[in-house]
Each structure stands twice: as C-alpha cells, then as structure tokens.
Amino acid sequence: MNKAADTGARFRSIAANDGAVRFDAVTRRFGEITALNEVSLSIRQGEFMTLLGPSGCGKTTLLNLAAGFLGPDSGEIRIAGERMNDVPTYRREIGMMFQNYALFPHMNVAGNVAYGLKARRVPKRDRDRRVEQALALVRLTGFEDRMPRQLSGGQQQRVALARALVINPAVLLLDEPFSALDKNLRTSMQLELREIQRKLNVTTIFVTHDQGEALSLSDRLAVMSEGRIRQLGTPEEIYRRPCDRFVASFVGDANVLRGRLDGIEGTMAVIAVGIARVAVPRAASMDVAASAPVDLFVRPEHLTMTEATESCATSGTVVAHVYQGGYVDTYVECPESSRDRLLVRSGGNQALTRWPIGSRVGISIATGEGVAFA
C-alpha cells in the first residue's frame, strides 16, 4: 500500500473514535462581513453531512475552510483529531468535487483522474490500476482516452468524482455538484453518488441550497443562515420538527395558520385553530403562555380538504389546482386563519373533480403534525 493510502487508512481509523471532521467555534470574516460566526460542528466517520442554506449563509465558506482554501480567523478545524488550521490543502487528504467539475481540458479522462496520484508520486503501475478501479466505480470503463469536450455533463461529473475518490480521501467535499444537470440526470447522479459513498464509507460534506436534495441524500444536515447553524439533525427531524421559523419556512413547503395555545397535555401542546384543537409536540411551545397567540406551521400533506359544513380547523375557497402527476397541489383562500393561501397536497387526482375552482371547502389538520411558534 502506498503512502497516500496509508494516510487515508490511518485517518479513518482515528476518525472512528474521535470523529472525522470537527469545527470548534470557527469564525471567518471578509473585511467587515462575518461569514461564519463561532460555528461548531462534529461530523462522524462515514457520515454524509449536508450544509444547507440560502446564498450567503456561510456554507461554502465552511467547506473551503475544511479544504484548506481558507483559514479561520478564530477557532479550530480538526480532521481525525489532528489540528488543520495551518495545514495546506495538499496535506489534508481530502477529495474535492467542484460545482463546475474543473476538469483539465488538455488532459484525457485517464489523465484527469490520475492527476492527484501523480502529484503524490504514486508509481505508474499502481496509478494505472487505481485509475482503472475508479473509472469502473463510476461506470466509465472504456472512456480513458476521451477528452472532456467529448463527454456529456453527467460523464464529466463522473470523471470529477473519480478524480476526487482515486486518492482514497479521508474526507470527500462536494460543492453543489448537481446544479448544472437537468432534473432527470440530477436525480440519477444523486442516487449513484449515495451508493458509491455508502460502498466506500467515505466521510462526505455536501453543500447545496436545494432542500429536496438535502433531505434525500443526507444522514444529517446542518441548516445555516447568516453565518450560523440554525438546526442540526436528521432529514426527518429537520422536516417534521423544525426548531424555529426560519428552518420551518426554508426546508420544504409550509402553511402558517393563526391559532392560540389552548393547553398542555403531557408531552403535547394543544393549539386551537378555529373550533379545532390540534396537538403538536410540546417542545415547540414551551415558552408560550396559555391562551397566547401562536402561528402553527403545517406541511401541505398534513392538511385535508373536507366538506365546509363539517367540523374543521378552518374553511375557504379553492382558487387553483396544480397537477403534479402523482399528486395535486390545491391552493385555498382562508383569510380568517391565514394571511397566505393554504397549500393542500392530495394523492391521486380526485381533488381536481371533487373540489373544482370556486368550491367552498373545510380544512382539517392531522393530529401530531405541525409545530407552533409565538
């Protein structure tokens, strides 16, 4: 085994006990702008961690700090327990896949993939073997002699991934690698990437602003805003139990209904919306006084349209349908309970015929689904 492989194996062994990557109170400024403000994050060995947030939230800055392209103004960065603040990029044993792939146009596929191995002075015989294995992993066997201009976008992406993986990295860093692909190819490549990542058990930090991408790929994700991590958790935790208004609004679709705290029952808070009572996890309403007004955030799939005469949380008028193939998005005007149109997501296409535009409908809320904020 060569030196690079030895180092990667050592990092993974240490990371199994100490964590693969740690950011401890990391701050980074650009002039008067604070891009990261005392961010702390621990990423486990073999974990697929996604940094999710809007443009300018600090997620790419955090990735660049892990890569060594930037240094922190304060705080520590550790990979497998070793302090990396002053360690140059080429000594961090990281694989990087850029948004634009950054392939060398004058090199063929094999040359692009082998570049990191040549920089590490891996012997040619071993280098050729590892390039062959990496191309087989991304299903590009037989493409060795092609130039980047002769490849499709998806094939170029596979070459970039093979180049990042061929060095046996301790950590794989991905900076919005799917943004340039069309929808169908993007979905296909997401699945392939996740399969490869699980097979190799390589610790991965993935940057995106696409909520669907983050929810479908991640073991855990960190939702970022204004240089801070707003919430860290599994995709289900983030989606179903957002910690604040920003996370609830940014991740997925959400309806906001006006209500009030009716009482506490064990671990649940009971929220009154119209004549209905909806139980939501108590933690979201712990600091809200009884009878205080709250906003109830509910996902579209947790709302159901009923006859307007039935007991329901609110009622309104259907103003639009959007057919999405396997489901229908229905928009309902409910001025008494929400300043915005409510979005109701229904399986199949029955909503189109049962509730035509202009229909008066009632809206019921699934028990236990939702989160309330003062």
Image (cartoon, helix red, strand yellow):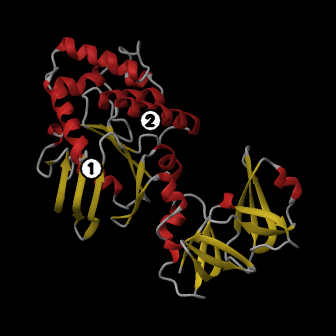
* Mark 1 crowd level (few <14, some 14–19, many ≥20, 10 Å Cα): some
Give the vertical position of 350 relative to 113 (above or below).
Answer: below
Q: Which residue of the protein is positioned furthest toward the front in this rendering?
A: 266
Query: On screen, 146 above or below 168?
Result: above
Tag 2: amino acid: Arg
Q: Name the N-terminal-most of marks 2 and 1.
A: 1
User: Which residue corresponds to the image point at 20% horizontal and 44% vertical from the top-left?
Assistant: 80
Q: Nearer the viewer, mark 2 or mark 1?
A: 2
Residue marked by disc 1: 64
Q: Which residue is mark 2?
A: 194
Element on which disc 2 rests: helix
**Percent coordinates x, y for residue 291 in the rendering:** 60, 88
Q: Residues within 10 Å of mark 2 (few under 14, many from 20)?
A: some
On the rendered image, what quadrant is the N terminus found in? top left
Image check: 268 left or right of 89?
right
- Tell me which residue sits at (36%, 15%) in the image: 144
Please tell me whether mark 1 sits on a helix, a strand or a loop: helix
Q: Residue 366 appears in which quarter of the rendering?
A: bottom right
On the rendered structure, is 161 left or right of 82?
right
